[in-house]
Image (cartoon, rainbow, N blue to C red):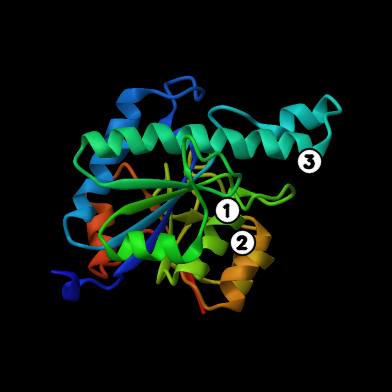
Amino acid sequence: MKENLKYKRILLKLSGESLSGPDGFGIDPFRAESVAEHIKEIYKFGVEIALVIGAGNIWRGRAGLERGMDRATADYMGMLATVLNALALMDAMERAGIVTRVQSAIEMRDVAEPYIRRRAIRHLEKGRVVIFGGGTGNPYFSTDTAAALRAMEIGAEVVIKATKVDGVYDSDPVTNPDAVKFDTLTYIETLNKRLEVMDSTAISLCMDNHLPILVLNLWEEGVLRQALHGEAVGTLVCD
């Protein structure tokens, strides 16, 4: 079935809020199970899946910075929080029948494998989903940048940024009913318009390496399956 897919190896970027409860914080086991079911829908097609997940549901470094916290300390706390989310998602996915591995850029061998590029690729080739935790392992870099970096390292064909909206708009569609959705964008347009697709470092990395970014609504039924089969969904950022 893999030969019918447009993308055979993907990196899925999730926000921490995808696991949170109604208040936007913490880890809701029911939400984790729901995310796992969405991933299972495409896993059965044989696509090789890697994931990077944020930590906004546990720790927002900006709040610490506003109180005078050291930036590096705030960023390391965020990286540790991504591992918590990765473990929660791994558990939900394993219970859904998806063989999963967590690799962390910050070494913590008792709970996760250290990030080793060749081992990650081997897991993917064997049909295992790999969740990359710990960001890049360095402060001053976001999980968006970690997603772009890991995608290039493992040879992913696309970064799929799964959000709560069905693409990229020229303004917030929640507050502006007249917001216009983009079907396609170039990297330069995305940077010049300061559209909140990913941070500028991540977009520049993708641009330099010709790695497309697809922004879509994770919670829209069947959208991941449609994207894998090349149907026009969300917003595609590319050359």
Tell whether label 1 touches label 2 (CB within 8 Å): yes
Q: What's the residue at 22%, 55% (across, down)?
A: 42
Label 2: element kind: helix
Query: Looking at numbered disc 1 in the image, what kind of residue is underneath it?
Result: Asp
Front residue (pair 104, 30) = 104
Using the image, determine if residue 22 lies above or below residue 167: above
Q: Nearer the viewer, mark 3 or mark 1?
A: 3
Q: Nearer the viewer, mark 3 or mark 2?
A: 3
For this view, does 218 lie left or right of residue 141?
A: left
| Residue 85 in the image, given as x and y percentages of width and height | 47, 34
Which residue was labeled with disc 3? Answer: 72
Query: Looking at numbered disc 2 in the image, what kind of residue is underneath it?
Result: Ala
The answer to which of marks 3 and 2 sits earlier in the sequence is 3
Using the image, determine if residue 114 lies above or below residue 81: below
Q: What's the residue at 51%, 23% (across, down)?
A: 25
Which residue was labeled with disc 2? Answer: 202
Q: What's the residue at 74%, 34% (across, down)?
A: 74
Instruction: Estimate how packed mark 3 is, as few (under 14), some (14 to 19) or many (20 or more) residues with alpha carbons within 10 Å.
Output: some
For this view, does 213 lie left or right of residue 43?
A: right
Query: Looking at numbered disc 3 in the image, what kind of residue is underneath it?
Result: Ala
Q: Which mark is residue 144?
A: 1
